[in-house]
Amino acid sequence: MTATSDPIPSRRSLLRALGAGGAGLALAGCGVPPARVSPADRTRPDLSRGERRVDFANWPLYIDTDEDTSRRPTLDAFTRRTGISVRYREEINDNDEFFGKISPSLINHQETGRDLIVVSDWMAARFVRLGWVQEMDRDRQPQVERQLDPLLRTPAFDEGRRFTVPWQSGITGIAYDRRRLGREIRSTNDLWADDLRGKVTLLSGLDEAFALLMQGDGVDVTRWRADDFHRMCDRVERLVRDRHIRRFTGNDYIKDLSTGDVLACQAYSGDVIQLQADNPNIAFVVPEEGGELWAESLMIPNQARHKANAEALIDHYYQPEVAAELAAWVNYVCPVPAARDVLASSGDEETAALAEDPLIFPDDAMRSRLAIARDITGDERTEFARRWNALAGL
């Protein structure tokens, strides 16, 4: 079963480097000393054994749903197997908004009422730096240890994924209309060809746009520097001045690409799966210079009441059979490569085809070009966001 509505585009279009998080962002960006929580103040007595429940906050439309009963099969299977009930809330609509919602509790060393949350990795980096999430006990998570995709194991903000575990992943690359353009795109630099003048869009969010553009300049985005960022902005500034770039967008590039107003654009892999269903001429490419691999990750916030139960739920989703069921519904890059064999042997032609889709299970050639970008630190954010937002007209 596949999703009738794509989960991530509706969210990622809202992300901005200096979004609605106001006071919370200023606090994180400036590194105010009281905001940092020491390891000794992150935990409380775990009630998991006596209270067989877990409170899970996630984004809308980001889990498999039985369309006939409105139940969530993979969550129901967890409860049947473990006896742990799940209070599942689709309450996260924007990273910055959610940051502001729970930050007062975390600053004051209080529980948030949530045992498990999912945020984008660039926001997860803030939580990790501030000491607002707990280190997980991998002895309780053998499937995570065994099944997590090696490409996702060592982001710069959380080496070894001690505090975070990917829920789903995706790729920022280039989407284009083969038929209307009349040629292939293989490189980020192909976007700047004369025949695309006024027919190209870039993503408006700093965190969403910068890595792919730096990769186009040959930068290793796992350890980029300030001069790499400014050199990239210099190029974008020239392209804006020359009116080569049509505009900066959220996920509304989908409409522009569908109508032909735009022929090529920065795009998310999951969007293209949806677009291809209506227009097989839409292609997605990870450029020769590389594309950005990102994730939205599970974390256990400080003072969570049911830490062990949350760890068990995370491990449940790393069983290949469960990961396959979720991947078939959400259509983003699956963080469990072994789920591919489960889908391939499903016996259902449509489901088995998902196992061969490189936008769900990237092939070796694509994987070799993917990298997780170093996140923008709090010290860097104000300066970089000011420059990028001026370019993007934000």
Image: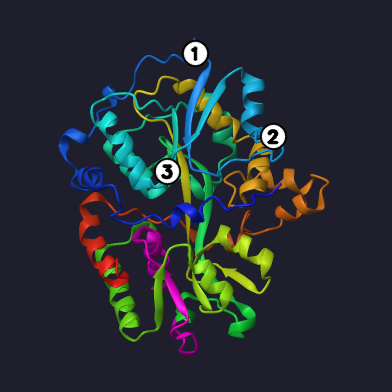
Task: Indicate yes or no whether the magenta region holds residue 206.
Answer: yes
Sequence-wise, which precedes: disc 1 or disc 2?
1
Which residue is identified by label 3? 119
Vertical placement of residue 78 versus 97, above or below: above
- Please say whether residue 203 is one of the residues in the magenta stretch: yes
Residue 278 higher or lower than 343, as above or below:
below
**Could you tell me which secondary element the residue under label 3 belongs to?**
strand
Marking on residue 69: 2
The scheme the figure's colours follow is: rainbow
Q: Is residue 139 visible?
A: no
Please name the amino acid that badge 3 sits on: Val
* Front residue (pair 220, 304): 304
The numbered disc on residue 146 is: none
Q: Identify residue type, mark 1.
A: Glu
**Neighbours of disc 1 within 10 Å: few (<14), some (14-19), many (20+):** few
How many labels were placed on the picture?
A: 3
Q: Along the horizontal axis of the image, is 226 left or right of 216?
A: left
Q: In the drawing, does residue 296 fall left or right of residue 71?
A: left
Which residues, given as a range, are shown in magenta? 192-221
Question: How many angstroms separate mark 1 from mark 2 (CA)?
Answer: 27 Å
Instruction: Using the image as rendered, state which of residue 79 and residue 3 is in the foreground.
Output: 3
Lower sequence index among marks 1 and 3: 1
Q: State the residue at coordinates (56%, 31%).
A: 315
Estimate the x, y position of residue 235 in percent, counting from the top left. 32, 78
Name the residue furthest left. Answer: 33
Mark 1 highlights which residue? 51
Within 10 Å of the Cα at label 3, are there few (<14), some (14-19), or many (20+) other Cα atoms?
many
* Secondary-structure class at tag 2: loop
User: Residue 147: x, y in percent?
Assistant: 59, 39
Q: Is the C terminus in the top left, top right, bottom left or bottom right quadrant? A: bottom left
Q: Of callouts 3 and 2, which one flags the residue occurring earlier in the amino acid sequence?
A: 2
